[in-house]
Image: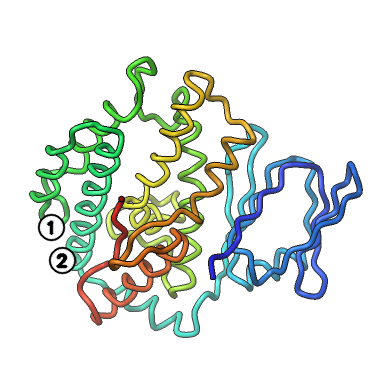
Amino acid sequence: MIKRTLYFGSPAYLKTENEQLILTNTETGELKTAPIEDIGIVILDHQQITVSQALIAKLLSNNVAFITCDNTHHPTGMLLNLDGHTLQSQKFQAQVDASVPLKKQLWQQTVLSKLINQAAMLESIRVPARNLRNWADEVKSGDAENHEAKAAAYYWKHIFPEFLEFRRERYGPPPNNLLNYGYAILRAVVARSLVSSGLLPTLGIFHKNQYNAYCLADDIMEPYRPFVDKVVVNIVRMNGKFLELTPSMKKDLLGVPATDVIINDEKSPLMVAVQKTTASLAKCFEGKQRKILYPTFS
């Protein structure tokens, strides 16, 4: 069953009772409930939301990714369960002990999958992408020749209409804001699945940053980014240059976890596909298989 993504953008009080999340809108008095077992992600996007400690604890124990937004409405923090798997210490150890050659092979697979999905994304909007497919064929262990960067330069130059003169920069002008929002949701999905697969989101296979608690999530989400990009491209087509984040745009981006993707030759919601990806990664660390399962963009 695909877990729900719940977004709260109005003043509210959130608590729990009888295994339910209970929302009281503090402006209207309206009451809503949702079974906690059905929830995968919670996003708090208002400065006047109050949450009970009992609810936070219950959400985390049910492996819910709990995201809070700042006063500019962008995700700024995330809470995750610390005890996501019954064999966690064993899986942690396998991850910690992973050899450099293994991590380089896993990164090669990740970059190859990302480039193929970027090529398919461009082709879906009628942009030629043969060079990306060629670079994907040339990716070596650890992506030593940095084909990922070459592909990124071409990809971002051609993905949006020329009138935007787009450059991918985290704090750059729109639609960077839309990409950031979508990627934050995707990152939460991936981090949540890593924890439930018994892995440490902090220890990356490629990304390394002492200030980043989610290096592995940033690695594993790479082949999934084009699915967010597609949503943003559609928003740009509908809105032109008017790209300040609106409730309808947020609604589109909040639908990313439910997007259908193809993984292992089967159609699957993205959130379920990510779980298959992280489970396969855990098996790679344990020496039980040699390949990460990634989705294909179609």
Which marked residue is nearer to the observer: mark 2 or mark 1? 1
User: Residue 291 location in percent, x, y?
Assistant: 22, 69
Q: Specify few, some or many for label 1: CA neighbours under 10 Å numbering under 14, 14-19, or 20 or more.
A: some
The number of numbered discs placed on residues in the rendered structure image is 2
**Tag shown at residue 101:** 2
Q: For the view shown, which residue lies furthest in the right direction?
A: 29
Q: Quadrant of residue 128?
A: top left
User: Could you say whether the residue bearing mark 2 is in a helix, strand or loop?
Assistant: helix
Q: Earlier in the sequence, mark 2 or mark 1?
A: 2
Q: Residue at x 37, y 73 (%)?
A: 279
Identify the residue under disc 1.
Answer: 141
Amino acid identity at mark 2: Pro
User: Residue 122 location in percent, x, y?
Assistant: 27, 37
Q: Is residue 105 left or right of residue 270?
A: left
Quadrant, the N terminus:
bottom right
User: Residue 106 location in percent, x, y?
Assistant: 22, 63
In this rendering, the answer to whether 150 lies above or below 240 is below
In this rendering, the answer to whether 214 lies above or below 39 is above
